[in-house]
Image (tube, coloured by chain):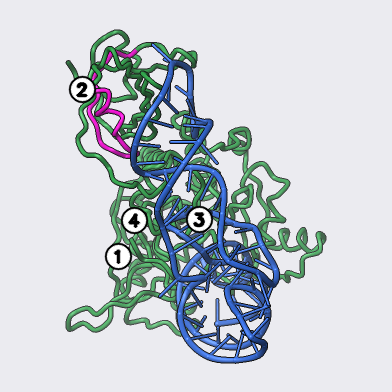
Chain colours: A green, B blue
Amino acid sequence: MKNIFISDIAAHEGEEIILRGWVRHIRHSGKLLFINLRDGTGELQCVAFAPELGEEAFETAKKLTLESSVIIAGTPKPHQKQAGKFELSVKTITPIQIAQDYPIGKKEHGPDFLLSNRHLWIRSSKQWAILRIRHTVYYAICDYLNENHFFRFDSPILTPNACEGTTTLFEVDYFDEGKAYLSQSGQLYLETGIMSLGRVYDFGPVFRAERSKTRKHLTEFWMMDAEAAFVEHDENMQIQEGLIRYVIRRVLKDCAAELAILERNVENLKAADAPFGRMSHREAVEFLRSKGSEIDNGSDLGAADELMLTQDSPVPIFIDRWPKDIKAFYMKRAPEDPNLVLGNDLIAPEGYGEIIGGSQREDDHDLLQQRMEAEKMSLDEYQWFLDLRKYGSVPHSGFGIGFERLVSWMGGVAHIRETIPFPRMIYRIYP
RNA sequence: UCCGGAAUAGCUCAGCGGUAGAGCGGGUGGCUGUUAACCACUAGGCCGGGGGUUCGAAUCCCUCUUCCGGAGCCA
């Protein structure tokens, strides 16, 4: 008899096979016993009939509890009640370990309880589905970039100083070198990589010590930064749009079952795979003011503004040409107006907010140095960054994706804390 | 950090001045098609901590703690 995975069950109809997994659900009715078994690849109903199993084995099987681990041998057959599905006609049941009082029941639980039991919560079907979508989004991003001549270039997590100088960083003691900081973005390091590899990306955890307390923020989250030589502002946005639409198509193709478990509205996802909206920051401000927002020309968009902008749009919207004063020092000035920069945000529809921030970078040594001096940055600490503009500088652009926000949007997940195995938030570090 | 809300059985909640409740989960028994199964019985409580008001407080007041939602910051 062969060990098989539940996802491969259809290929083994009528054969005697072995499944190994965990009891998601168990119930019995006189001489019949039903076990919903999950093995990581899927879930299958196993049906045991007392006279076939033997009375003693049947009594033992009845003692299985929620989440007990078990080996079940039997024969896959078409499900008697659900067309197109299979069930296992059970021959033997061998408990591996009987779980005691599994804390997560089939009824509803509160978020605090579930987060305290995150190590167990990840077994439940919605969490399983979200984690599988996370996996799919991850590889879709990598595949798209690999196909477009980007090379993986991992940036460091321990850094000597703040990448962008704006947000609060986590600080650690670093031997005799003083303080080191957990990276909030690998972007500046990526800019060095393009001078060697042409196009590069990194993908890893980044850290923000902000006391953010919303459904869109984590203190530790995964970011994918991409950077490309000889790519200017418009092409940069084309790459971003191509990437996001590629991810949408992959998720729709590979995660139909997961999206169904999450009750994701897939029509909304399909509709987002169409040319993205584009407006300048100035146009966005005018539009918002016409709708009653109090936003002014020099301000960043608030959460309510983002929602107002996208609520009637089936596709994500690029906002570009931002006032330089509210964007990072390394962004290149717009040719038509030195007060604007060639930066873009990408706002997802359905209220998921900003999922990408990108820009063309300042490639002129003296202009960059002026900006850094204006921001009172230490030129010594960033000498290596300025060097890039001295030795073969080229026009270049890049962007960063908030990975969990993208996963939230794909899966239609209301809170970002469910899109990462172990969320880190201001008031939670366990488990 | 600011503005709201909440804390009662293992879990989710009701009770809102007068003997501590339900559903689920646990235990025992029943049932050949269940899938949040069903039926019967059963065990289970410092009503978040501290202080007040009152003849009497889970309930009203003050305070602390913890959590949730939102804002700001950002991805």
Q: Give the Cα distance between marks 1 and 2.
A: 41 Å
Badge 4 density bin: few <14, some 14–19, many ≥20, Cα 10 Å: some
Task: Please say if the residues under marks 3 and 1 sit with CB atoms less than 8 Å apart.
Answer: no
Determine whether the residue tagged by mark 1 lies in a helix, strand or loop: loop
Tell me, yes or no, if residue A94 can be seen here.
yes
Q: Residue A151: where, in percent of width, then height?
A: 31, 47
**Which residue was labeled with disc 1?**
A157
| Camera-side mark, 3 or 2 | 3
Q: Amino acid at mark 3?
A: Gly
Q: Which image quadrant: the N terminus of chain A?
A: top left
**Which residue was labeled with disc 4?**
A204
**Which residue was labeled with disc 2?**
A3
Q: Earlier in the sequence, mark 4 or mark 1?
A: 1
Task: Give the residue at x 39% y 16%.
Answer: A86
Q: Give the Cα distance between marks 3 and 2.
A: 37 Å
Determine whether the residue tagged by mark 2 lies in a helix, strand or loop: strand
Task: Please say if the residues under marks 4 and 1 sit with CB atoms less than 8 Å apart.
Answer: yes
Q: Earlier in the sequence, mark 2 or mark 4?
A: 2
Q: Amino acid at mark 1?
A: Ile
Badge 1 density bin: few <14, some 14–19, many ≥20, Cα 10 Å: some
Q: Give the Cα distance between marks 3 and 1.
A: 34 Å
Task: Give the residue at x 34% y 24%.
Answer: A7
Determine if marks 3 and 2 fall on one subunit. Answer: yes
Determine if marks 1 and 2 fall on one subunit. Answer: yes
**Which residue was labeled with disc 3?**
A110
Question: A421 and A288: which one is in front?
Answer: A421
Q: Give the Cα distance between marks 4 and 3.
A: 30 Å
